[in-house]
């Protein structure tokens, strides 16, 4: 499945702030994980100790999706329908 990460689109476009446009999200790049399945061809940053520890000792959870709302609050969901609901609620607030 496609990861659909905005961070990889930002890496591909070099656009580090502001809203991403439809053109940004459709950029032709192997780093665009909205259009290419799986991981990008190389890392897009250097992970810290906490990220490496989390990768080695992942939490027991069934999450597949996450969303960061405009305030920076993170939401994690197990299903796409639940993700769409949270996304809709975040957009309404």
Image (cartoon, rainbow, N blue to C red):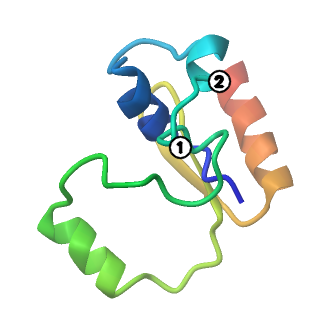
Q: As drawn, is 90 to the left or to the right of 56?
A: right
How dense is the environment of label 2, judged by Cα within 10 Å: few (below 14), some, or many (20 and up)?
Answer: few
User: Circle 2 — which element?
Assistant: loop
Q: Quadrant of residue 86?
A: top right
Among numbered discs 2 and 1, the one appearing first in the sequence: 1
Of 16 and 30, nearer the camera is: 30
Q: Which residue is mark 1?
A: 5
List the single residue furthest toward the right. 81
**Residue 14 in picture, x, y percent from top left:** 33, 21
| Residue at x 32%, y 21% (from the top left corner) | 16
Vertical arrangement, residue 32 with respect to residue 92, above or below:
below
Q: Are marks 2 and 1 in contact (CB under 8 Å)?
A: no
| Residue at x 41%, y 21% (from the top left corner) | 13
| Residue at x 30%, y 46% (from the top left corner) | 44
Q: Quadrant of the N terminus?
A: bottom right
**Residue 92 in picture, x, y percent from top left:** 72, 21
Q: Which residue is mark 2?
A: 26
């Amino acid at each position: 499945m496609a990861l659909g990460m905005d961070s990889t689109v930002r890496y591909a476009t070099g656009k580090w702030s502001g809203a991403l446009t439809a053109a940004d999200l459709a950029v032709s790049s192997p780093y665009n994980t909205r259009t290419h399945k799986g991981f990008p061809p190389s890392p897009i940053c250097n992970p810290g100790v906490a990220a490496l520890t989390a990768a080695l000792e992942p939490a027991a959870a069934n999450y597949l999706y996450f969303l960061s709302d405009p305030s920076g609050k993170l939401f994690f969901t197990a299903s796409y329908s639940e993700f769409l609901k949270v996304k809709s609620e975040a957009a309404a607030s």
